[in-house]
Image (cartoon, grey):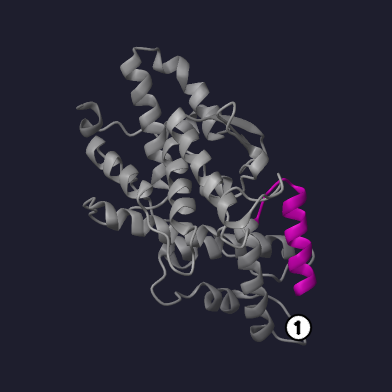
Amino acid sequence: MKDLLYCFLESKKAAGYKYREEERMLFVLDKFLNTTLSQEDPVINCDIVRQYIAKWGNESDTTRMHRLSLLRQFCLFLSFDDPRTFVPPRRFMGIKRCVFTPRILSRIECKKFVESCCTFPNSYNSPLRGIVLGTALLTLFFTGLRAGEALRLTIQDVDLCSSILHIRDSKFGKFRYVPISHDVRDRLFLCKEKITQKIGNRNLCDPFFCTSTGLSYSISALRVAFKQVISRSGIAIEGNIRMHDLRHNAAMLRMLLWYEEGVNLEAKLPILATYMGHKNLLSTQKYLHLTKELLIP
């Protein structure tokens, strides 16, 4: 089954899908199938699917939906050669994807978040953690980059002279330029300077947001830092706030600035869509959540 999983992964990548997180999930699926499938006749049937989709600990239905969706794609791939393969329906076992309502910060909360990022402390074992991850979160907040896009930035991608970020490996494989403000540029310059003082000069292709060993930080490490920044900021959170909500906040802040400048917002939407790396305006409109708190200075 390992060879078939590899062929499936390669077919998806050849079709233009990144499949970064999915590749990790396929590794877990491979281990599961190796211990579950019959060696004599390794066919994925309904019972096998039920076992794999069963809830693991306290995981959410959204996580289960991700596993179901990937397994369904793999089963469709297998069914072309072996029609006995069970292809689960999209909402198999009643699993539904949770619809998240993004948490839009008020102006006061925005200031608290920025201050918390700027004062995020290093740790004894990670002497660059505070400045690097704090700056990375500020970059997400002010630019609307996806977390993976920010962490994949190399030194040559961050043009501090022109105040431009070069996004080379986006979700849809599209290259784009993202402008940054002078404040964000200055913070990125400080971050780069602190890293150089700690580990010396680096190559242009090295990750911009790196650890004290020069390696790129993981998304999980950035997510932990985000939770800590929120906790330190004193922002009252009812329910849950996701790191991805920073992308929603960035879109709203950009539109609010244009609104206060008195420009034609409808004419600016395509520009915002380009900044955020969207394929169409409909995707961008989903990120616009104007609130009363934002409109009040």
- At label 1, which amino acid type do we have? Asp
Percent from the top left, x then y, of residue 98? 39, 55
Q: Who's the residue at 62% across and 73% down the image?
A: 28
Q: Is residue 39 above or below residue 117?
A: below
Given residues 89 and 24, the one toward you in this image is 24
Residue 187 against residue 296 in the figure, above or below: below
Position of residue 154 relative to residue 275, above or below, is: below
Residue drawn at the location 47% of the way across and 63% of the way down: 63
Q: Name the spot of residue 92 as percent of width and height, x first.
A: 50, 65
Left or right of 274, for residue 231: left
Instruction: Tell whether 32 sits left or right of 135.
Output: right
* Prevailing secondary structure of the magenta residues: helix
Q: Is residue 279 magenta?
A: no
Which of the two residues, 226 or 173, is positioned nearer the viewer here? Answer: 226
Is residue 15 found inside the magenta-colored segment of the image? Answer: yes
**Secondary element at image label 1:** loop
How many labels sit on residues?
A: 1
Q: What's drawn in magenta, residue-wise?
A: 1-19
Q: Quadrant of the C terminus?
A: top left
Image spot of residue 296 (x, y percent): 19, 27
